[in-house]
Image (tube, helix red, strand yellow):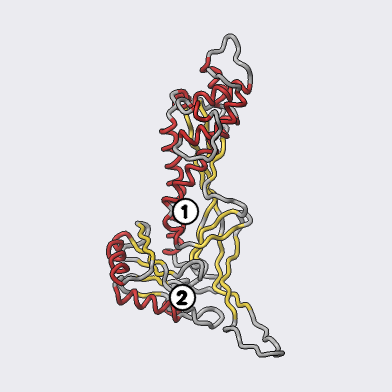
Amino acid sequence: MLNHTPADILAAGPDAIAAAFGLTTRNPHPLADELTTAPLSRLAYAAGLAIRPQQPHENDRVVMARGMQSSDFAGLLASASTTLANRRFTAVAEHRAFCATLECRDFKPTEIATTDVDGELPEVGDLHQIALGRVLVGNGATAQLRTFARVLRASRQLIVNDNAGMLADAVENLGTAAARTEAREVYAALESNPTMDDGELAFHADHGNIIASALDGTSLGQGMAALRTMTLVGGNQADLSAAHLVVAADLELAARKLIHEAGLQITVTATGRLATGRWYLLPSHEAAPTIATLRLKGSTQPVLIESWQEHEFDGSSMRARCDTGAVLVARTLIRGGV
């Protein structure tokens, strides 16, 4: 069944599976092209041979079955699957356009604080003493990273029949599920109107960040003005530009039309996870973070797919994991709607 050593075939495995999943690789392994017609079955066979040479009483499918349970084969599937799932995650996670990212060292509750300085920079003349300033901390919140996971099984029949397309579809659906899970956390954080560490609600008329009006040109203008004039914890005026308009599903067309006709440089994000008529106006997260997603320190991708041992399952198993969460970190955003 193989014209090359098992080690050579397995070395070509990452590029072969990537190609079968529709992923582009630079400088693919020379043998990867030879595996494109039957990548899953041939790699499972090679993994089985790497464990133990084929015995006289064993047919090819017995060797494949042995390989399917191996860490070599599962690792090959997991590597390509991680890339594919994260590509889909990126395409689906529209909420990340307006979210900052916060790193958590572990899964324990993490204190998040909003900081400001006490005033603007004073002018300093030659040989004049530079005045001391203070960093003020306030409006904090507590965040906690959580793990969301699901096991994906590739059956023996799927592997033997080389249904790489079916497996790729399942992996992409995991990426979609992870993005939707994180989006759920983000919109829940917005809608919950949490109590901040100062004991006051995130959204309240006293903070000037609520506009109890339907979305139209007038209310949008009020929101833009409020972002400019609201007061920060250090007493400074925020003077923030509106960068993102996040709206409930029923407002999407009206919001896009409103922004287009006004010629504003504001990105519209619509979702079915907000209450009917709800809208939020946010500054750029690079200028003033307001809502943030969480990630584990050191992680580089939102979705990790790894091999998962299930000795009673006839095939190969993987576990998709997404460590995420969301937290409202500041009051410098506007909540609108009636």
Label 1 residue SS: helix
| Residue occupying image coordinates x 43% and y 42% | 172
Badge 2 crowding class, 10 Å Cα cut-off, few under 14, some 14 to 19, many 20 or more, is many
For residue 227, above or below residue 311: below
**Residue at x-position 45% and y-position 26%:** 37
Q: Nearer the viewer, mark 2 or mark 1?
A: 2
Residue closer to the observer: 120 or 227: 120
Q: Is residue 12 above or below residue 268?
A: above
Q: Is mark 2 on a helix, strand or loop?
A: loop
* Residue pointed to by mark 2: 240
Query: Neighbour class for label 1 at 10 Å: few (<14), some, many (≥20)?
Result: many
Of residues 184 and 126, the one drawn nearer to the viewer in this rendering: 126
- Seen at 36% across and 78% down, the residue is 222
- Mark 1 highlights which residue? 182
* Amino acid type, label 1: Glu
- Dividing the picture into quadrants, the one containing residue 204 is bottom left
Point out residue 32 in the picture as x, y percentages from the top left corner.
52, 30
Q: Where is residue 239 in the image (x, y as percent from the top left)?
A: 47, 79
Answer with mark 2 or mark 1, whichever residue precedes in sequence: 1
Q: Which amino acid does label 2 sit on?
A: Leu
